[in-house]
């Protein structure tokens, strides 16, 4: 049984939950303890006490802790990647890739811990010194979704610790395995003072809500759905806590007449269907210019027919299963809805039977869709892409921006003029030219606009905005 980690000890929960393999529903990945409100409060109290110590730790001490954690994650990439694929359904290559990313994130912030600089400004008053420094926020609550079970926790926990905060971490209920393994490494290899890092697994309504409403939690970093994010945001705002929310996407990929067709198809296949389409940065809307539309759809159908959908750990699998029955039902519901709204399902969208019982769905392509349809406005979060036909570049840009979301966007073109214009006028936080809308670097800022994100950017040096508090000091010597 995998326990929670509170105040430096592994403790049982008030109940447990089984972690089921989406590639093989007979395979139980493990049993995980569920914390309740009382245990979550204990974790918060422990973090509150320990944070004072951790804030005083030297930059080198914090850096060394993160470096040890990163080293162990990278050394165990194959084993942890297999665990991730087994519980979440990403292919093994994708699982290992995500683990490597998590390890690199810890290494990056091991360096950043040593680089946190302040500023000295000339004063407008004679003899006065003005200094700007950054201090830890205090206790940070970290709440994560199921689709990146190790990378998202890593890119929140690493900067939180690097800048002297204490952490209470609540992973997604569906995939506690990678989060637990990461926590075990942090707890042991990090050699942190007791209480600096705490793991509380359990439902959002109890564990998450306790974290969000505790006065001792000074900042909450959340990634997940828009609905949950908005309610967390309101709770934090009410009590004046700092909050950062990364939420949904409805990311467009524009394909212009002058695109390299083969490259555009590769970019679309990757962005729409890899990781089973369960990426907040996935390309769910393919906005295709009239002149290339038919050739693009034909080439997509051909490539989609060759995608191997199977057990995530089987060699040769391109697309693993959907994460759960609920998510599968949601994907099928939207495929049906798209057809009802007037779209044409031209490839995939079928339940597949494989050697093991799992949530297998062939990637779906729906053509003849309009921007106003619900499948083009609401996040599906599965291997489902819709095609919107447009007359020219201006209409493509307008269609791409016609969404309440604004996380990522992309364009496939050989025109410098259109690529440059798209980078300027796309209303997304991340813009890609001839590369998939999903897939970002760990040292560059990550985040969106409009309904996709709220608060400071994550990752890279930008992460310090959220995990530190700025102090301005005036001295007359
Ligand atoms: P979700 O909102 O259901 O859950 C996210 C987390 O919030 C989970 O840990 C959950 O237990 C917790 N939670 C639920 N209710 C809560 C409450 N009342 N108080 C506190 N915590 C609560 O999201 P999900 O289904 O796990 O993940 C899928 C969603 O995540 C998609 O919408 C996807 O777009 C989004 N996502 C966004 C990004 C990004 O960076 N923008 C990245 C990955 C996933």
Image (tube, rainbow, N blue to C red):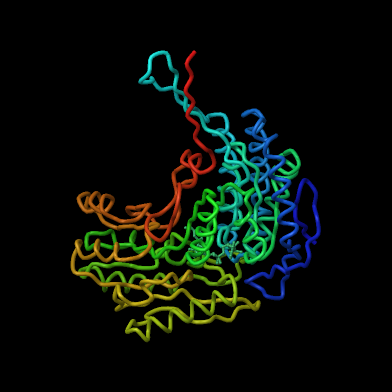
378 relative position to 416: left or right: right
Left or right: residue 82 compared with residue 156: right
Give the number of marks.
0
User: Residue 435's x, y, as percent?
Assistant: 37, 54
The answer to which of 89 and 199 lies nearer the viewer is: 199
- Provide residue 209's location: percent of width, then percent of height: 62, 61
Quadrant in which residue 28 is drawn: bottom right
Residue at 66%, 50% (x, y): give it: 168
Q: What is the quadrant of residue 119 in the picture?
A: top left
Closer to the camera in the image, 239 or 411: 239
Q: In this view, does 125 lie above or below 79?
A: above
Relative image position of residue 375 (x, y in whole percent): 38, 75
Q: In which quarter of the image is ligand 1?
A: bottom right
Residue at 77% in and 57% down? 3
- At 46% from the left edge and 73% from the top edge, which residue is drawn? 363
Residue at 40% of width from left, 22% of height from top?
A: 121
């Amino acid at each position: 049984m995998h326990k929670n980690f509170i105040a430096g000890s592994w403790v049982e929960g008030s109940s447990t939950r089984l972690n089921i393999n989406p590639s093989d529903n007979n395979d139980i990945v493990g049993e995980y303890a569920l914390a309740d409100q009382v245990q979550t409060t204990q974790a918060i109290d422990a973090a509150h006490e320990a944070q004072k110590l951790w804030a005083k730790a030297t930059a080198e001490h914090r850096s060394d802790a993160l470096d040890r954690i990163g080293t162990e994650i990278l050394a165990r990439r194959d084993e942890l990647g297999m665990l991730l694929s087994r519980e979440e359904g990403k292919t093994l290559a994708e699982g290992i890739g995500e683990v490597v990313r998590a390890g690199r994130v810890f290494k990056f912030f091991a360096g950043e811990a040593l680089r946190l600089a302040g500023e000295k400004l000339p004063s407008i008053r004679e003899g006065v010194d003005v200094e700007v420094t950054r201090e830890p926020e205090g206790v940070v609550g970290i709440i994560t979704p199921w689709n990146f079970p190790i990378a998202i926790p890593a890119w929140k926990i690493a900067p939180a610790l690097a800048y002297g905060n204490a952490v209470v971490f609540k992973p997604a209920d569906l995939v506690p395995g990678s989060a637990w393994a990461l926590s075990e490494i942090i707890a042991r290899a990090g050699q942190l003072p007791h209480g600096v890092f705490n793991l509380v697994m359990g439902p959002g309504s109890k564990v998450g809500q306790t974290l969000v409403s505790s006065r001792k939690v000074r900042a909450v970093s959340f990634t997940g759905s828009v609905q949950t994010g908005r309610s967390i945001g309101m709770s934090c705002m009410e009590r004046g806590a700092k909050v950062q929310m990364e939420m949904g996407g409805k990311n467009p990929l524009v394909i212009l007449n002058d695109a390299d067709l083969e490259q555009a198809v590769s970019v679309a296949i990757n962005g729409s269907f890899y990781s089973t389409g369960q990426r907040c940065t996935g390309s769910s809307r393919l906005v295709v210019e009239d002149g290339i539309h038919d050739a693009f759809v034909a080439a997509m159908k051909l490539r989609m027919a060759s995608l191997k959908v199977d057990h995530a750990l089987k060699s040769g699998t391109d697309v693993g299963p959907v994460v759960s029955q609920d998510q599968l039902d949601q994907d099928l519901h939207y495929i049906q809805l798209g057809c009802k709204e007037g779209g044409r399902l031209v490839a995939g969208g079928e339940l597949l039977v494989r050697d093991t019982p799992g949530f297998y769905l062939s990637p779906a392509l729906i053509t003849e869709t309009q921007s106003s349809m619900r499948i083009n406005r609401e996040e599906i979060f599965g291997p489902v892409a819709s095609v919107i036909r447009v007359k020219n570049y201006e209409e493509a840009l307008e269609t791409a921006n016609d969404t309440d979301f604004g996380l990522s966007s992309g364009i496939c073109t050989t025109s410098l003029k259109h690529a440059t214009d798209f980078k300027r006028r796309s209303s997304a936080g991340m813009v890609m030219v001839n590369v998939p809308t999903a897939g970002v670097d760990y040292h560059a800022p990550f985040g969106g606009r409009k309904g996709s994100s709220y608060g400071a950017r994550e990752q890279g040096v930008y992460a310090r905005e959220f995990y530190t508090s700025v102090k301005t000091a005036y001295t007359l010597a």
